[in-house]
């Protein structure tokens, strides 16, 4: 099973602000939907709550230390990231997406095979940051630049990185 991190990050590594996103980029939301629809997605409790309700067409695995935490039927709660990865493996999934936030990205990075990063061309203010990554260990395999326009205040590139084989 391939573990794929999906994130939109600024040039300053920002990913979040006041439990939401630091930007409004409809183009990225479409890309995110296309990438993750039909899949199982792992996220921290804070990111899950920031959504308001589960994302349609995706099975959520929510990571929390709260053993009594409840999610709607058809979704999962785990108390450790490893448990979430094991759900994916036991279901025979080809791919499991990690959707953040910062705490869950940090826990997941050692297990990730792929990173689907929206590189936002700007450094807006925020309070949550993607963890430091040694990019020497990753190979860029695709990049699609998107210019800014009336609906999308920041230009951004959709980039896919895979972990280099040692
Ligand atoms: N730009 C992007 O692509 C992107 C993507 C996702 C999220 N975000 C943003 O990131 C921010 C949220 O990120 P965050 O780092 O604050 O929160 P988070 O990673 O979404 O969730 C943190 C929660 O995960 C649980 N957790 C963390 N480590 C754990 C462990 N070792 N074992 C069990 N549970 C654990 C805890 O839940 P409990 O407190 O319930 O125990 C913790 O409070 C928001 O602003 C969101 O909008 C941005």
Image (tube, grey):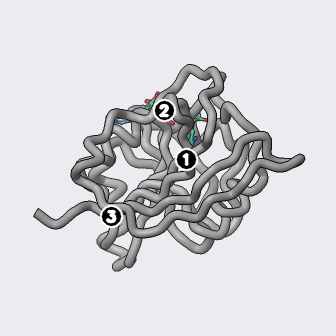
Exactly how many numbered labels are in the figure?
Answer: 3
> Label 3 neighbourhood size at 10 Å, few (<14), some (14-19), many (20+)?
some
| Residue at x 30% of width, y 70% of height | 89
The residue that mark 3 highlights is 162
Q: Is residue 29 left or right of residue 66?
A: right
Q: Where residue 25 sits: x, y (%)?
A: 75, 47
| Residue at x 69% of width, y 57% of height | 146
* Local secondary structure at mark 1: strand
> Label 2 neighbourhood size at 10 Å, few (<14), some (14-19), many (20+)?
some
Please tell me which residue lies in front, 14 or 43.
14
The residues tagged by marks 3 and 2 sit, at their Cα atoms, a distance apart of: 19 Å
* Local secondary structure at mark 2: loop
Q: Is residue 29 left or right of residue 108?
A: right
The residues tagged by marks 1 and 2 sit, at their Cα atoms, a distance apart of: 9 Å
Q: Which residue in the rendered view is the most extreme toward the left?
A: 166
The residue that mark 2 highlights is 13
| Residue at x 63% of width, y 34% of height | 122
Labelled disc at residue 147: none
Please tell me which residue lies in front, 78 or 115.
115
């Amino acid at each position: 099973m391939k573990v794929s991190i999906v994130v939109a990050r600024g040039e300053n590594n920002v990913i979040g602000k006041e439990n939401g996103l630091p930007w409004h980029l409809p183009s990225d939301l479409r890309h995110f939907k296309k990438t993750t629809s039909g899949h199982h997605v792992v996220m921290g409790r804070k990111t899950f709550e920031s959504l308001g309700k589960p994302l349609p067409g995706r099975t959520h695995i929510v990571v929390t230390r709260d053993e009594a935490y409840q999610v709607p039927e058809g979704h999962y709660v785990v108390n450790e990231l490893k448990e979430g990865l094991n759900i994916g493996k036991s279901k025979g999934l080809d791919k499991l997406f990690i959707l953040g936030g910062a705490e869950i990205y940090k826990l997941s990075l050692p297990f990730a095979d792929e990173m689907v990063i929206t590189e936002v061309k700007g450094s807006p203010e925020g309070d949550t940051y993607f963890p430091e990554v040694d990019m020497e260990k990753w190979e860029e395999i695709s990049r699609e630049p998107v210019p800014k326009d009336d609906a999308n205040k920041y230009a951004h590139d959709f980039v896919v990185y895979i972990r280099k084989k040692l």
